[in-house]
Image: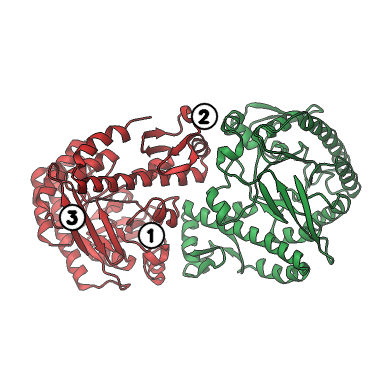
Chain colours: A green, B red
């Protein structure tokens, strides 16, 4: 994997670059649609590539491990073959889901014992196992197995958790270095900065992660309930420590506003379920502002949902479909929100390259965050 | 509307023709996908036109009347504009749903009082109201308001019901003739033969319906639980009475086998929820036979679901999606089943035109009905 940093903004810390992977290029800053169990919910792969213009999508290791399971993915020749997606993919390590979805879990030095949220069966994940699983899934980029502490958590918990994450990281890297990609395409490993909302811990963790000299670095444990200002403060601090020549991935973030603010702080990669989850509930991001399509005001509005992204369907029709829980409503709304997110980050990129990113951000934010 | 009968088979009574409507041609025999409340469940309009190659779709008057409601459709400029579908559409009269979905209903000479299955609100449909509603929805073909008797029902009930349907039909036609299309495109009216499974009633009804001299004729009240042989017998009888120069529409039928058998009896048009409903439950019609995709045998089958219709997704992947209740599974499966149905009727048409329909039917039925 190669990161080509094309330009860093002079007013902010925003960056435009290109990540080259074994399955093609990714233009940063980038948003990665979340394909939880091997499908970005309700969006066919063709639409994801051609309409949304997604350049990389994410799959969740925890979910894929449970269903369809590793043997199915392995015998298919990896996740890309299995789901018919030939562009880059990224897998998380499963850590986040182990801590958020599983009721019963026991964290030890060796790893985490937990029960499947589907059938209660006992599962054990360790840094080595999470690494092996991600080798088997076969994503182009894969993530360290970390503990994502809850918010709020006290200083001692955050520090102990961070240190455990660091020890786990070294075991992940050892295992990563001992193993090879299984399907003939390069895989890159990203470590994850933790440390909750404590500045000294975040700084320590960022230094530790930077020292691993991996091809990209991630920031985890944010957007878990803390105020946005605290998220920005931690992101800013960590970005000042992480090496500029490597891409920076802020995990699980966020709203359009969060994304533009964090691009300004030096983040290159984002993922979030927000656009697809909100879409299914009728909460739509458009080039003219935010629409709650369930609102009665759209009942007779026959103008396109968004001239830019979904010109063929009217607001009135999408309102009807979402209200009736028709699947086509979820599909149109998800294509709309993901297309908007992709447009947002790629337009940000253009403005970073032309040098007027901050002026554009100031102008566009009130437009796209306005409730219509 | 114009029906051009191109060829009638010499061995069977199968026919190939062309229906010309204000929104383009329909090549018969034809299958019409069911778009209950203004959407063929889980299939985007573009896929319906380009992949499935649907030539006409159906909407249910009862459902559209309840949601989104007539004012929404009317102010949109009719159902085609509203859902963004520019090919022909057909609406049923609402009669079938009034009798199948509504618990509390009261049939009088004037019409039917019933309660909405959604919110229990009181509604009254009469032949005149059903006609006016269908004028407002704006489909290219619309149907008489009839009573669809249950199966089984006794002779007296069937006869009284048929006579009521005939009286209602004359009121529908009077109203149809007194009114004009609302959106500048011709609308055609089809009466419906009833009479349950009683030969003399079916014959009486077919004569009565034929005498109305409408541009097409429908057969209702079949495929409601009676044995297939009885359905074929009634269809055969009615087809022998209905005029050959008008298209014949067998409502709510059926399996691929039912469709080929009824084409052989002289039917030109079909609609059924079977392909889309079965799709959502993982029951798939393919060019090589029937697949229950939930079966464990498909878990590691990475061959395309169907080379002909869904070559880009494997059986193993679709099994996973359907098992996980992922919407993409319903979309792929629905496109598969509808594409298969369209292929079936259009290939039947080709063989009617070349004169070897019955030989082809004999050869293809064991293939497509085989459980894989």
Residue picked out by circle 2: B300
Q: Secondary structure at mark 2?
A: loop
Q: Secondary structure at mark 1?
A: helix
Identify the residue at horizontal 42%, vertical 47% (top origin).
B335
Whichever of callouts 3 and 2 sits on the residue coming sooner in the sequence is 3
Residue B191 versus residue B109: which sits nearer the camera? B191
3 vs 2, front mark: 3
Label 3: how many residues lie within 10 Å, few (<14), some (14-19) or many (20+)? few
Left or right of A87 on screen, residue B265: left
| Cα distance in 3D space between marks 1 and 2 | 44 Å
Residue picked out by circle 3: B6
1 vs 2, front mark: 2
**For residue B333, what is the image quadrant?**
top left
Left or right of B281 on screen, residue B125: left
Residue B87 versus residue B143: which sits nearer the camera? B87
Residue picked out by circle 1: B66
User: Does residue A196 sit above or below A293 in this rendering?
Assistant: above
1 vs 3, front mark: 3
Whichever of callouts 1 and 3 sits on the residue coming sooner in the sequence is 3
Residue B144 versus residue A84: which sits nearer the camera? A84
Label 1: how many residues lie within 10 Å, few (<14), some (14-19) or many (20+)? some
């Amino acid at each position: 994997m190669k990161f080509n940093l094309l330009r860093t903004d002079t007013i902010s810390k925003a960056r435009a670059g290109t990540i080259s992977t074994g399955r093609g290029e990714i233009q940063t800053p980038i948003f990665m649609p979340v394909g939880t169990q091997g499908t970005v919910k309700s969006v066919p792969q063709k639409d994801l590539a051609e309409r949304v213009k997604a350049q990389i999508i994410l799959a969740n290791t925890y979910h894929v491990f449970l269903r369809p399971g590793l043997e199915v993915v392995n015998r298919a020749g990896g996740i890309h073959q299995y789901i018919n997606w030939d562009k880059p993919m990224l897998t998380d390590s499963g850590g986040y889901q182990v801590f958020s979805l599983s009721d019963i879990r026991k964290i030890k030095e060796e790893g985490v014992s937990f029960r499947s949220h589907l059938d209660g069966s006992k599962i054990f994940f360790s840094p080595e196992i999470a690494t092996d699983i991600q080798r088997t899934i076969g994503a182009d980029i894969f993530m360290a197995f970390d503990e994502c502490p809850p918010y709020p958590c006290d200083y001692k918990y955050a520090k102990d958790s961070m240190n455990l994450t660091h020890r786990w990281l070294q075991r992940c890297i050892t295992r990563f270095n001992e193993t090879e990609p299984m399907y003939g395409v390069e895989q890159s490993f990203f470590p994850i900065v933790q440390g909750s909302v404590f500045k000294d811990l975040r700084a320590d963790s960022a230094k530790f992660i930077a020292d691993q000299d991996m091809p990209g670095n991630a920031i985890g444990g944010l957007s878990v309930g803390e105020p946005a200002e605290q998220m920005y403060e931690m992101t800013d601090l960590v970005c000042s420590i992480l090496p500029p020549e490597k891409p920076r991935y802020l995990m699980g973030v966020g709203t359009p506003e969060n994304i533009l603010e964090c691009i300004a702080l030096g983040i290159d990669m984002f993922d979030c379920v927000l656009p697809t989850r909100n879409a299914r509930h009728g909460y739509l991001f458009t080039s003219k502002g935010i629409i709650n399509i369930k609102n009665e005001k759209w009942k007779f509005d026959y103008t396109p949902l968004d001239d830019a992204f979904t010109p063929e369907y009217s607001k009135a029709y999408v309102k009807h479909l979402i209200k009736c829980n028709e699947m086509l409503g979820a599909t149109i709304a998800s294509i709309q929100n993901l297309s908007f997110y992709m447009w947002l980050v790629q337009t940000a990129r253009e403005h970073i390259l032309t040098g007027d990113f901050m002026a554009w951000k100031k102008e566009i934010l009130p437009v796209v965050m306005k409730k219509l």
